[in-house]
Image: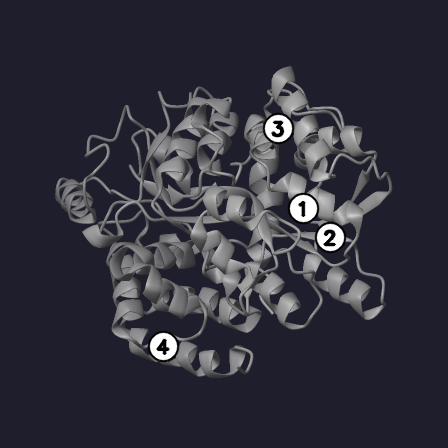
Amino acid sequence: MASPRYVTAVLSTVLALAVAGCAADPEPAAAPPQAAQSAVEAARQAAVEAARGQRPGGTVNLLGLLSGPQLDQYLGTFKPFEDATGITVKYESTGDLFAVLQTRLAGGNPPDAVSDPSAGQLRQLARDGKLVPLDTVLDMAAARRDFPTGLLDMTTVDGKLYGLFFNTAVQSLVWYDPKRYDGPKPPGTWAELSGWATRAAASGKTPWCIGLSSGPNSGWPGAAWIEQLVLKQSGPDVFDAWWQGRQPWTSPPIKQAFQTFGAIATDPKQVVGGPTGVLSATFDQSPLGLYAKPPSCYLTVQADFLGSMLTQTVPGVKPVEDISFFPFPSIDPRYKGLLETSGEAIGLLKDSPQSQAFARYLATPEFSALVAATGQWLGVNKQVGPEKYPSALGKQVAALYRDAPDVRYAAQASMPLPMETAFFKAVLAYVKQPSRLDTVLAGLERIRRTAYPAG
C-alpha cells in the first residue's frame, strides 16, 4: 500500500520554515487571515447548501498529517462550515498516517474521514471496501467541470470516485534568481534550456543544483525529476501506465527519463559537486547555492513551496525580484502545459449526513478560495482564479494550474509502498554508478511484478 513517507518530512520541515517568518500565526479555528469577509460569508453559504439547508450538528472526526501553524490555517478553512452547520470538525494529527489508520481500522474504530497525501493508499482502501463512494454524495457534473480529470481519475476505482483532492501544490518548477540567471525566462523547450546550460558549463558556470538527501526518504527529489521527464517526454498515457504498474521499468520511455536526469545529475560540469554532491546535499539546502557569492548554481527544480521557503529563510530575498520560476519546459510539444501535483485528498470511511455535507463543502469553489487565501496551498477547484492568492508567486502558480490542459498526481506517491521505496533507492544507486542503469532498472522491474495487487 502506497504511503509517501517523504510527504511528512516535506510538510513538517518546509512548510514550518515557510510559515515561521509570517508576522503572526493565525488563531486556531479562525478563518484564514487573508480571506475577505465576503469570501468567508460565501463559504458559509456554500456550507449551508452542502448540508442541504439543514443544521445537523454532530462531529466529523478527520485523521491527517498536519500540525502546528499549518494545521491552524487548515482548520480555519473549515470554520465557516462549522458555523453554518453546527458540525464540529475534530482533527486528529499523526506523523504516521498509514500505521494509525490501519490500527484504527483493525480495531473497528475508523475516523469518519481521512486527509491523505497518498492516492495509492486511498485506492487500496477503496479496493478493500473501506471507503464510501462519492459518486452519489457529490454533484459529479460539477466535479468533472471544476476538477482536473487526472486528479479525479487518480482516486477512481472500478468506475467509482473514492477521494477528492482539496489542496494541492505544483511540482517540478524551475527556480532561479532573476538577478543572476541570464538564460531564457521562460525557455520555449527543454532543448533551449539545455543549450543554455551547456554554454554556461563551457564558460565555467555550474547551471544546476540538486540535492537528493532526505533522511530515510533520500532519493525522492530525483524521483520527482524522473516523473516530470516521463510526463513531458512520453505523455500522460505512459505516465499513468507506469505508476499503475503496467509499464515496464526497463521500457525505453522510463530508461530515457533516467538518462535525461542522469545527464545532469552525474555530470560535474552540470551540477554542483557532481554525483557525490548530489547524493550528499539535502533537498532543502541545495537551493541556497542560488545565493552563494558567487552563485554555485543558477537553476534548481522543486515544488511551489520553494519560493515561500526561500523568502522566509534567506535574508534579503524578495519574491519575484530575487526568486522566480518557470514551468518545467516542454520536451514533446504534444504534452505542452501538462502539470504534476501533490496534495491531500479526502476519503470518507463512515457514511453520515455530517461526512457527506463535509465532502460537498470541500468540493465547492468557495472552500477552495479560503484555501487559496492561506497562502500555503493551491485550492484544487479550478473555478478559483489567481486573484484569490495573497502573494505574487502564488498568483503565478495558480495561473499555471488554472491554464494547464490536464494535471497528474505525483507518480511516486501513487505507487505501492515497496515500489516507491525501491524507486527512491534506485535513483541513488543510479547517480552513484550510472553505468549500472540497466541493472538498476531490471531490479525495479522485478519488484514491479510483485508489488502491485493482483487483478
Q: Residue visible at 48% across and 53% down?
A: 151
Q: Which mark is residue 113?
A: 2
Q: Earlier in the sequence, mark 2 or mark 4?
A: 2
Real-space CA distance between mark 4 and mark 3, rounded to the nearest whole angstrom: 43 Å
Query: For mark 1, does the 10 Å Cα neighbourhood hold few (<14), some (14 to 19), or many (20 or more) residues?
Result: many
Q: Earlier in the sequence, mark 3 or mark 1?
A: 3
Query: For mark 3, does the 10 Å Cα neighbourhood hold few (<14), some (14 to 19), or many (20 or more) residues?
Result: some
Q: Earlier in the sequence, mark 4 or mark 3?
A: 3
Real-space CA distance between mark 3 and mark 1, rounded to the nearest whole angstrom: 30 Å
x and y, in percent, of residue 273 in the image:
32, 50
Real-space CA distance between mark 2 and mark 3, rounded to the nearest whole angstrom: 29 Å
**440 left or right, relative to 260:** right
Real-space CA distance between mark 4 and mark 1, rounded to the nearest whole angstrom: 36 Å
Mark nearest the camera among 2 and 3 is 2
Q: Are marks 2 and 1 in contact (CB under 8 Å)?
A: yes
Mark nearest the camera among 2 and 1 is 1
Q: Amino acid at mark 2?
A: Ala
Q: Is residue 271 above or below residue 29?
A: below
Q: Which mark is residue 248?
A: 4
